[in-house]
Image: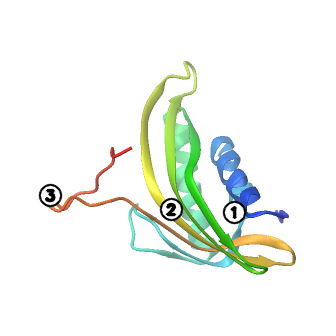
Amino acid sequence: MKANFLKVQDVLENYKSSVYEKNVESFLSAYSPEIHIYDCWGSWDSKGISSWKAKVEEWFNGLRAEGVSLHVDFNDVVVEENLNLAFVHCAVTFAAHELESGEKLRQITNRFTFGLRKDNDSWIIVHEHSSLPISGESGKALFDLR
């Protein structure tokens, strides 16, 4: 699926809606085939769209099996862009809701940085980095700062 993201904000909106719908193809349409991701779940990084697709499928399938919808909110968004490159940093909150009742079960806020490139007049993500702050005392991730 090839999408056309005329504005950087279109990429973020696609991220939100694709996660909520658990639509792997729509989600991946905003990523470069050569994507390089530093993620805070399970492995140091992910290189290439096929590797990222496997992780996204696992993520979305887990949400389906658990019976939850995932709501994504972008906060404190800063976008710096020129004609062909853009840099975005923000806080992204993921809130899991029970499908039947709509009850919020849990949420987490990660720090995100996206590097985007304009390709055939459409913005695509070429690099993504998500992180959580780490406690200096315990060495563990801090999940509930926001």
Determine the CA span between mark 3 and mark 2: 23 Å
Residue at image x 76%, y 81%? 84
Residue 109 screen position, x and y as percent: 44, 48
Please say if 82 is above or below 92.
below
Q: Does residue 136 lie above or below 86 as drawn?
A: above
Disc 1 or 2, which lies upstream in sequence? 1
In the image, what residue type sits under mark 3? Answer: Ser
Q: Is residue 36 shown left or right of residue 25?
A: left
Residue 122 at x, y = what percent? 82, 71
Find disc 1 in the rendering and name its residue: 28
Asked if the residue under mark 1 is in contact with the one under mark 3, i.e. CB atoms within 8 Å, the reply is no
Question: Judging from the image, what secondary structure is the residue with disc 1 in?
Answer: helix
Q: Earlier in the sequence, mark 3 or mark 2?
A: 2
Q: Nearer the viewer, mark 3 or mark 1?
A: 3
In the image, residue 2 sits, relative to residue 23, either above or below, namely: below
Residue 54 location, quadrant:
bottom right
Q: In which quadrant of the rendered image does the C terminus lie? A: top left
Instruction: Write the residue at 53% across / 55% down.
Output: 58
The residue wearing badge 3 is 138
The residue sitting at the top extreme is 101
Q: Which residue is mark 2?
A: 112
How far apart, in angstroms, are the residues tagged by discs 1 and 2?
Answer: 17 Å
Residue at left offset 12%, top offset 59%:
137
